[in-house]
Image (tube, coloured by chain):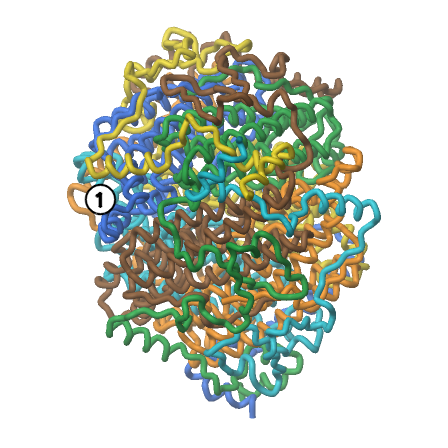
Chain colours: A brown, B green, C orange, D cyan, E yellow, F blue
């Protein structure tokens, strides 16, 4: 069960309202690399986890991410605080209010739709979706997903720090960015404390294909590196010939019963495009100068 | 530019139609861990990448994933081949067709909506969305995302192999699963060929918070492991007191101009919930015991 | 900031695994009336709220809803616990596992995609979206939204209780259902402690239209009740004549500059559908027996 | 069945084109509180409703909302009328057209994607989704949802009125805003004409929890009001101890069969994170200080 | 403005409740080819249309589609009528109700979430989205979209007719299917009454590429037909050589200022993947064979 | 299977970076009429197609659309190239970077979220969704969908050409626009090479309704044209009387079993809105004039 304390985990001091900057900050509130995504990724893993150590860690970090969601949401809320009253009380002239609402990218989303609150959208106004959550319930995959998610979140915070010179915001974002580093370390330790963890899962794979590099993209900038060259790699460079890797005919087939085959054959006959025809078409009918032309083919 | 050969990269031999199994297979066609997501993740990274080696690798693997999309789509198409003709030609009785359409989870989606084709949905019928793509345009983050994505895809293939005994499908899925292993190796080599790569990005973070573990989840199953204990970790176990980590007051604040402050104060006054009131409410009016009370105001 | 205790707010005792029932329970985990929606609705209101009493209440209830999300997620997780190991270890025959995966509506979503965990989807597998959150940042509207949301959640719990005879689940659901009642009472008290709260907002509206009932739907089952009849209501029953309510001509107009008018006129001329024509069309070309027919109109 | 008259229910006179203002107006065309959402909310309730009076009312109001959708769409269309011809005929220089397209937030969405028409998106360009519709088929819940929806729509109209000084638009919006007031009154009358209506549904709830207020959010701004204090309320202030409300152990449990237990145990053993290990991880390999360490394993 | 009559445009007589069939029917209520999509496609075109004839036609057909939405919704509602009362009153045993709720694909969606009403989802439970609407505000494109949409809707009705033997439903669906034919004819007449209409729009295109067929897909089943062969077609069969069609070098380039170039070069240097390295990676650390290697760094 | 060559199908020369223009260009990268939608529409048709000629054509065009996706994505990437380095290296002052990020509509989406890459979103930042794909697996419908899709894409390219004066971009867009013309011709030829193709599918429809025009929209601008007038059309102008087209009573009915009827009756009784009541409601309680009334119940 959860409890809450009205103090933030990190104090937020915003120097002045700025609804456009608020929109940018939403990226980490309701965006794909944001704090709700982080909290829900780890929370959904935690409640299904049977390993007591990982379960504890996942609850610890999920809970902290909720506190971070509160911090970034509070930044957004402070940045919108001026617009909130103006929009509701309308003591400005409409023209002034219109200018402030439309002065920057997407700030109107905050003002009109959410009334100055922090919305669970990204910086373009797209609502948060659980499609961002890549939990699949297998720890060696999920921990890798968590490691990657922390890396992405770290970078997005870095970018947000780069676009503001408000010292209080920079400091709070710097804190949030740093915590992503700490969490990435924890998730890596938990992953490598599972031995073995590669390949993930139980099945070893077909050995003839697990160290094969298929050079499907040809052309002037073909390059080599440890990702495709070395003693463990087998390379396949001749791909233009269209040779299936299994040595088969590369076709897809299924055995149908006779009734199903008959239905399919009837359907094919009914919907056949006759390759020997030269039909007049809509494009012919609709082309300029096509009015005359269109009658000729049928003659 | 792309070219195509009508031979599949791996031959697909399906033993008999099965639209319910087709629905399950869609998970890797139009689902979050599926082949379109893989192809588009690497393709969007490739076209923006300036490093020639990574660019080459990303195009190689993106292109191969398109070939894998074609393989899994061909499996789905073969599994639905019987239903395709039956639904269009309707030579069965309606009752039989109804039974085949509704016999299993979501198979009707294939039959009714997509006419026996392979739809870009997951196994529940949810349309594919680019919200699955976590490319952010920074290589040390994106490569970690790719590593995690390959791990997830590997596991989902393993699960699909576990639910069918069709030998041809198992073999093709085994091939696809194995390729995820190979791709994960390539992405790891490319990541660690960047030095340093941790923390990702350019900013080092605030040192006092980068190795701190906050034990936010209390209770009987508190555990220790390398993810929260050891010489590099500082732990914070006392979290119930609500102490902000920065030593501040944990409040959020913003400096408003006087006009904005006035608007906000007016708004607050107008919408204040009076804590000393004891209002009659809708619940009172609508409760069974509230029938008497509710008539008096009209008197 | 948030903290967590690994004890649930209410003990969950599930009698036996049942992945189909787990799918139904997801409705209140990641569905529109579920606990994440509740928690996020109140949380987004709380962080933007300036009224100290409402802010406190909103944080109290938001936090409790997170504990409820944990309870319903734990129920789902317990119901899927059997499938989790079977799918990963695959000691069953594939045929048996296939049957268990496909035996009921949407249970495969759990098994294949989420590996036995609790997914942030509704019972049809649709990912949770912040489009469910109707917070708009005005308390007399938001509190009404909260009242309605609690009513809906109460009903969905009632339905879920009706479809299971697992005593432990029924008890936990009964608890969750009851809390919705308590929360509805709190939100109503907070709403009516704002005076006046109707109409919501600051503008009174145009008096000639605020108590007018327009009887737009005609027909045999026209009915009267306090919602359209009584001393405060003015009724408009004659709607078939198409009379605009403002007494104007019912047209939409805009004043364009001359350059814009000219562009628009050119565009209209270029794309005019000639009402006096009788063109041959694609349907004519493609109709059986239409090959001949299609020439005649042009003659 | 529906019929239509080309006169609008309210005359729309727009003073001049303004594609940025058009974007803002879309909020009530294809946004969550907009007229399509209203029409569809009541329409879906109407067709499933068995109570003749409510069914009549729901059809009346649903139909009127369609007329309002037409009014707001006509405002958008008039505001975009200038851009429509310019974009299609391109008699401006490209530089001028580019400036007009990009001059304000999201106006390009109208110009490029929708060609000057009214799109079923909100003001940020997010497509309308039926996830906005909260109909659940129970009248005491649905009517509360309707009351809340009318309150929200009223407020959004108020905000839109505040950001324009076009007299014709202000008047039409004032009409639409006023009708939301009237509809809210109707829905309230219909709700309270059901007796009893609280709690919604058939089940009374567990009496020990229906008037309990759990003070989960602690801290300096704890407050009291009629929503948590008074003769009907029982309060629970001690939440930091983590005591489950049912007096149980707060654990989640399920009885598994022996085969399922064995699979799960095997899975747990295979994926255990060893708490006593101190593994080298990717972060170590990728840290700048880790360069030396990283080479040794390869020796 | 719209008006409504409570008589349906076509009488609906359903022989018996069937919630699974109801789910299938939802495809044409809230699915991509369904009646709401049709109504909104034509309505959004109508309100922005300046041509009086097309505007009239679009309003006529949009309005009729709303009546069809009501018909298909009424079919769904009748098919769910039995479940509606059972779920609310719960006079069955829970076990019986559970069986009826879970007996078929997705029927539980109706029962649990929508309480027996007609939901604006497709047959898989996916909420309707305005992403289905392809209106772009240019009549020769939009009319082609309408023609295609009517064709698709006609086919989906055909499939639904094929899966039921309820005579009343078959008759109503037959009516709805037939109206799609009539609408397709109207839209085709309106399109070809614009002359010329091909190519759509104002720009003629580059003549060297408008009749070129690029044979990008090679292999055993290469075929010829009027779509790629004939006097008007130029064919390009040699695609494996990777020759850009413009005769250029096929590269993408942009001129950057010096400061931007420098930033980009710094970024590239910082994130270069060294092709000559052979780094130890996470996969090495986590492989079973890697257990030994992994311990040495810690020494 | 697919292969790739790093040369683009058409050379891209961008004159200078412009992230706002990049956002507009995204419309054809990840927007509804864009190249991914085109590629996936034809690809999903190709893999399920049994007609060898159409299958070949669909693979040819699908593959070419992937090359076009690469071209438009490369344009976006070049336009963002300056921002990419600036955002990552942050050698500008924050204030300058903020201005460049927020200077135009939605450019911040590129900068913050995608780091200067090409995102699979439309120009408003909405992620691509497979809901854009209207493939239904019947060739006479799908080919019409393809024809319409090419027409829409042609128009959107025309609009994009109109808003830029960058010669290199105009040329590349002109190429892409022209290829849509060529593809439309191919799809039309393939459609009309199926005879007959109208009405689509197998069922002829009810003859009394297939050439009936229902004039549902009345009013001053009623018009006639070949879409509703002529020898083949029967018109129905009297729609205000509410006469069902089948001559029936226009009601919806279903036969319920007695137990179901009883449940439904009980439910109706329990939830009846009493038309003869005049209840006090929330609006009354919350109105300013209602202040007095509201206190009396508590006395």
Which residue appears farthest toward the bottom when viewing the image? F299
* Residue E199 horizontal/vertical position (percent): 33, 24
Q: For mark 1, give the secondary structure.
A: helix
Q: Residue at x 36, y 30 (%)?
A: B51
Crowd tier of the residue under label 1, counting other residues whose Cα lies within 10 Å: few below 14, some 14–19, many 20 or above:
many
Going by the image, does A221 lie left or right of F211? Answer: left
* Residue A79 horizontal/vertical position (percent): 33, 63
Check disc 1 and report the residue beneath it: D100
> Between B180 and F61, which is closer to the camera in this rendering?
B180
Which residue appears farthest toward the front when viewing the image? E299
Q: Quadrant of the N terminus of chain B?
A: top left
* Residue D199 horizontal/vertical position (percent): 64, 73
Specify whether residue C235 is in view.
no
Q: Quadrant of the C terminus of chain B?
A: bottom right
Going by the image, does E145 lie left or right of C164? Answer: left
B8 shown above or below D178: above
Going by the image, does D13 lie left or right of C174? Answer: left
Q: Residue at x 68, y 71 (%)?
A: D244
Specify whether residue A66 is in view.
yes
Q: Quadrant of residue F175?
A: top left
> Between D87 and E162, which is closer to the camera in this rendering?
D87
* Residue A210 horizontal/vertical position (percent): 60, 25
Chain at numbered mark 1: D
> Between F209 and D183, which is closer to the camera in this rendering?
D183
């Amino acid at each position: 069960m959860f409890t809450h304390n009205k103090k933030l985990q990190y104090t937020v001091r915003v120097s002045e309202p700025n609804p456009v900057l608020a929109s940018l900050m939403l990226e980490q509130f309701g965006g794909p690399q944001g704090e709700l995504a982080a909290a829900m990724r780890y929370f959904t893993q935690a409640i299904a986890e049977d390993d007591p150590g990982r379960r504890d860690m996942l609850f610890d970090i999920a809970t902290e991410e909720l506190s971070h969601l509160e911090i970034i949401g509070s930044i957004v809320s402070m940045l919108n605080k001026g617009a909130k009253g103006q929009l509701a009380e309308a003591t400005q002239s409409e023209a002034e209010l219109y200018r402030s609402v439309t002065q920057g990218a997407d700030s109107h989303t905050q003002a009109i739709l959410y009334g100055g609150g922090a919305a669970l959208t990204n910086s373009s106004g797209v609502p948060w979706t659980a499609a961002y959550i890549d939990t699949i319930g297998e720890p060696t995959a999920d921990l890798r997903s968590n490691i990657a998610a922390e890396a992405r979140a770290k970078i997005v915070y870095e970018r947000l720090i780069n676009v503001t010179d408000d010292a209080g915001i920079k400091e709070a974002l710097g804190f949030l960015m740093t915590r992503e580093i700490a969490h990435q370390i924890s998730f890596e330790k938990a992953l490598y404390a599972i031995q073995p963890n590669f390949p993930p899962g139980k099945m070893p794979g077909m050995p003839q294909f697990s160290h094969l590099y298929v050079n499907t993209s040809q052309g002037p900038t073909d390059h080599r590196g440890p990702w495709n060259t070395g003693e463990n790699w087998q390379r396949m460079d001749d791909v233009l010939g269209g040779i299936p890797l299994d040595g088969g005919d590369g076709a897809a087939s299924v055995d149908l019963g006779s009734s199903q085959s008959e239905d399919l054959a009837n359907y094919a006959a009914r919907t056949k495009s006759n390759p020997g025809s030269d039909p007049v078409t809509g494009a012919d009918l609709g082309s300029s100068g096509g009015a005359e032309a269109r009658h000729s083919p049928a003659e």
